[in-house]
Amino acid sequence: MLRIDIGTLAFSAAVASLTSALIIASHGPSDGSRGRSWLFAAAAGCAGRGQIIALMGAVDRQPGATVVGNLLMLHSAIGLHLGCCRLSGRQPPVPLYVAAILLLISCYISFFQFDYSLNERISFIAALRVPIYLDAAFAIRRTRRGHPSRGLAILEIIAWCCGAMLLARTVAALYYTQQDAYLTTSVFWQASYYLLWAGADIALAISVLSLDGEAVAETLSRTVVARTSELRGREAELRLIFDTTHAAIFFVNLDGVITQANRSMADMFGRSPDALAGIDYPELVHVSERAVSRDHMLSLIHGRTPVISTERRYVRADGSEFWGHLSGRQLTGGEGEPLGLVGVIVDITERRRTAAHIEFLAHHDLLTGLPNRLLVEDRLLQSVARATRSRTKTALLFVDLDHFKAVNDSLGHSAGDSVLREVAGRLLTSVRDTDSVSRHGGDEFLVVLSEVRDSQAIIAVAEKILESLSRPVMVEGHEIFISASIGIAVSPDDGMGFEELLKKADTAMYHAKESGRNAHRFFSEQMNIETVVQFGLRSALRHALDRHEFELHYQPQIDLGTGGLVGVEALVRWRRPGHGLVGPSTFIPVAENTGLIVPMGAWVLREACLQAKSWQVAGLPQISMTVNLSAMQFRRGNLEETVLDALDAAGLTPDRLELELTETMLIENAQAVMSTVEKLRARGVRFTIDDFGTGYANLAYLKRFHVDKLKIDQSFVRNLHMDTEDAAIVRAIIQLARSFGLETVAEGVEDIRQLRFLRHENCKQAQGFLFARPLPADELVRFIRDSIPVEVS
């Protein structure tokens, strides 16, 4: 009876120790506190089994059982601490692991040192499963945190099966060995105890499986919901970016058809997003680039090209065109299979327009829109290369406008700009489409004639240019006459490089100016020699004024009515050391081009006024002093002051001074000349139009300018007694002057027949070698005192 009571007590202790564990296992932990309760309950059950073994050992007087039981209770305490550490996420101390392992080994050693019965072995096997319950508690914690583990439940089922097999073996042993009632009763209770414990194991396994499934389902549900919410949030963000970005974004399938496009792309192409979906992407590209675009797209879709970045010309729904920068990348599936592509288009029309404008500014003249020197140099070199292959020539024409500065000085730079734009247009209409016209700077232009066969073709273009520029230009109500001097260099005769051809064309242009302007000249090596001479001439001319190398000669002017002396014309001469007396035709053009004509002209005015005053003081007849003026003196703007200073310095009355103007000066410097003429005439200075009939002056200019005399150019006088046309021109000039109340003076009279014609037509005055050559001042005095009136009848 004592054994039964003890067994009952042991059974009751075991049941009591498992109660809380079974309850918690059947419901499952829902938070951290329940997880800890389950751990404590499981550990208490393990400790209860250790107590049963210890009691049985005490009753049976088996000290080994008592030792084993006490070791198991201590092992349970250590296991409880380890479990708590693992549940709380802390790292348990290493010595505790070592102690637990040593205790378990001690249990095994103690157990096998003693002779235990079957029921004691069963109890010991059950007691050895203490760590499984601790691991079960940790598995439940992992299940609660979303990391399910079915391994423990499977081990529990396997353990139950092993226990059932062990029980069956015990019953079979009881049956065959016919043990006593005590053993039967003991085994029965131990077997019942183990079955109950195994039942608890089954309940635990089922509970773990249930918890595992429910937790997994709940965890998966929460994970799916959270993930779905997260994905929806990210999708909303991406959709917002997709719809609000300024770049056009689209997706294309394997067939090149657009499957989706954002609002920016719809606005860019003038279509709705739905209208874009289903369109073959290359259909949006300009027809000239459509085939290339399709090839690039298919190459990208099928992975032959990793990415694409290029510029395309696109067409909107209304047919208008724009430029876009396309960036594309292949779309692939989870296993790398191609799905299509995603593309981004940015409108770069304005950027390209700005870049093109910058490029244009870098290579074109802002005022005229013509190519500048940089671009025309490139074109000339290309033309030279083509001409070499085709065995033709390339000509470079250097076009310089004559007296253009007078337009700016008289009418202002706005009028000058208008003239330059007009000249640019006329040059373009004078050449072929294959030729190039460039503004070199200021009033200079370059013309490149490509692949010309001979010089006659070049001359034809040059004369066409001169003819087109000869037509008057209307600017701000003013009729402006312009002309140009053209220098021509030809490749390969004059060189192959731009700089070499430009230099030679420039040299030829200056020779065209020196030959009278409004002309063209081809470059020749003789020009180089003359250029060197001209350079030396310029250098010497700059020092001539300071060295007092200039002197005045005076040519008498005769009254054809009385034959008496009425005036003289002051003509400058240069007595150049080592060269003798140099005529004005040699150095005056150089002085004009270098600007030295202004100080030289001021010196001539002072000297002429002083000489006229000295003659007056010497008691010589009252005669007028005629001085020639340069257009540059008018452009400098201080001619009035220069003239008045010369008169004041000499003490000469203004009515004794006559100033000669050319027709070209009247036309090119109309405003400046008119203002100065009016102011000086108001002071008593008289004015003559020199070389009348050689320029473009007309009745309107004679009416606007109040002058006193017309001088008939010697080119008409020279052959008037033999050339009926010259005679008619001279007759017309005399009659025109008479109708305007002007006097006439003929220059270049060298023959008595010329004199008689002029006298017959009632020309008032004349000068020329027939009367006297230009004379130095002292010789002129002798001429005046010794001469008698000229016979003009």
Image (spheres, rainbow, N blue to C red):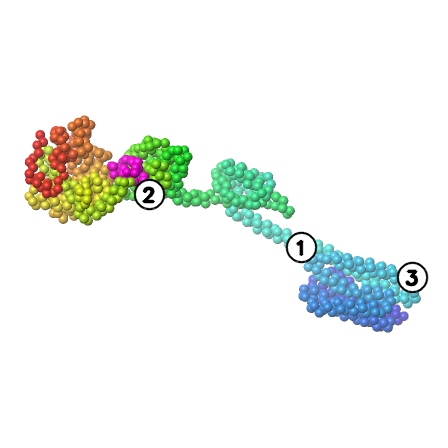
The circle drawn on residue 175 is 3
Q: Note whether 338 is above or below 73 in the view shown.
A: above
**Label 1: how many Cα within 10 Å (few below 14, some 14–19, many 20+):** few
Say which label, 1 or 2, has the lower sequence index: 1
Please provide the residue range marked out in magenta.
504-527
**Are dots 1 and 3 in contact, CB under 8 Å?**
no
Residue kind at label 1, given as amino acid type = Arg
| Front-most of residues 754 and 528 | 528
The N terminus is located in which quarter?
bottom right
Q: Note whether 44 is above or below 659 in the view shown.
A: below
Q: Which residue is mark 2?
A: 441
Question: For numbered disc 1, what is the local secondary structure?
Answer: helix
Q: Position of residue 234 (x, y in %)?
A: 59, 51
Q: Position of residue 436 (x, y in %)?
A: 37, 37
> Given this view, does label 3 or label 2 mark the residue nearer the observer?
2
Mark 1 and mark 3: Cα distance apart in space: 56 Å
Say which label, 1 or 3, has the lower sequence index: 3
